[in-house]
Amino acid sequence: MIRKLIPVLLALLGLGAGVGAGFALRPAGDAPPAEGHGEEAAADAHAPEGHGAEAPAEAGHDAGAEEGAPEYVKLNNQFVVPVLEGGRVVSMVILSLNLEVGTGQSEAIYAREPKLRDAFLQVLFDHANAGGFRGSFTDGSNLVILRRALLEKARTVAGEAVLDVLISDIARQDA
């Protein structure tokens, strides 16, 4: 039994290390501006371009435009889905999901996260049982079907606050 768990644990450890390294090594330009400093951060971003006096006016315009921008909610834990054939587990699929939500909806989504996780697991198990994780499971059409099913389920649980479901990581560990 422990022999079967070791590859899964190693895969999870490797995936976690990769995500951590990605966050640590991302370029400084990709970091979002700190909250409460939107105009100052935007002005700093425009300053190297040499706009001089125009930068503050543009920064104020950009900050106002971003107020309606969507927020992204990262679900805390990964989803682990077994793939069965003939009553045996032949592989495990590990996914990380993010939700695109309207401005100010993050807390409401976190409050409903257990219900969302339960609903998403049911969709993922149904997708696995239908053969969605066999073969070339990362094919665009397979992922579109999965995203659409996850979005429909998210909207039944959290309403129209959920704008989209994003699959940020996906991996399959064959036994």
Image (cartoon, rainbow, N blue to C red):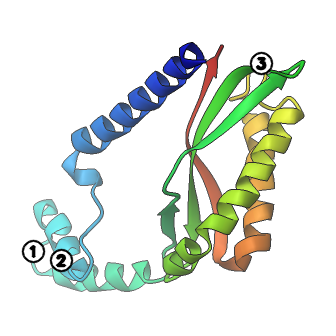
Q: Residue at 52%, 18% (x, y): give it.
A: 7
- Label 1 CA crowd tier, 10 Å (few <14, some 14–19, many 20+): few
**Which of marks 3 and 2 precedes in the sequence?**
2
Instruction: Give the residue pinned by disc 3.
Output: 135
**Which quarter of the figure has residue 171?**
top right
Left or right of residue 142, residue 95 in this image: left
Q: Amino acid at mark 2?
A: Ala
* Distance of label 2 from label 3 (alpha carbons): 52 Å
Residues at marks 2 and 1 touching, judged by CB atoms closer than 8 Å = yes
Category of crowding for the residue at label 3, using alpha-carbon neighbours closer than 10 angstroms: few (below 14), some (14–19), many (at least 20): few
Mark 2 or mark 3, whichever is nearer to me? 3
- Residue at position x 23%, y 85% in the image: 57
Residue 157, position as x, y percentages in the image: 75, 72
Indicate which disc residue 52 carries: 1
Question: Residue 79: x, y in percent?
Answer: 61, 44
- Residue 131 in sight: yes
Q: Residue at x 73, y 27 (%)?
A: 137
Closest to the observer, 83 or 127: 83
Relative to 115, is 113 on the left or the right? left
Image spot of residue 129 (x, y percent): 87, 34
**Circles 3 and 1: CB distance less than 8 Å?**
no
Mark 2 sits on what residue? 55
Element under disc 1: loop
Q: CA distance from mark 2 to mark 1?
A: 6 Å
Which quadrant of the figure contains the N terminus? Answer: top right
Spatial CA span between label 3 and label 1: 56 Å
Where disc 2 sits, the SS reads helix
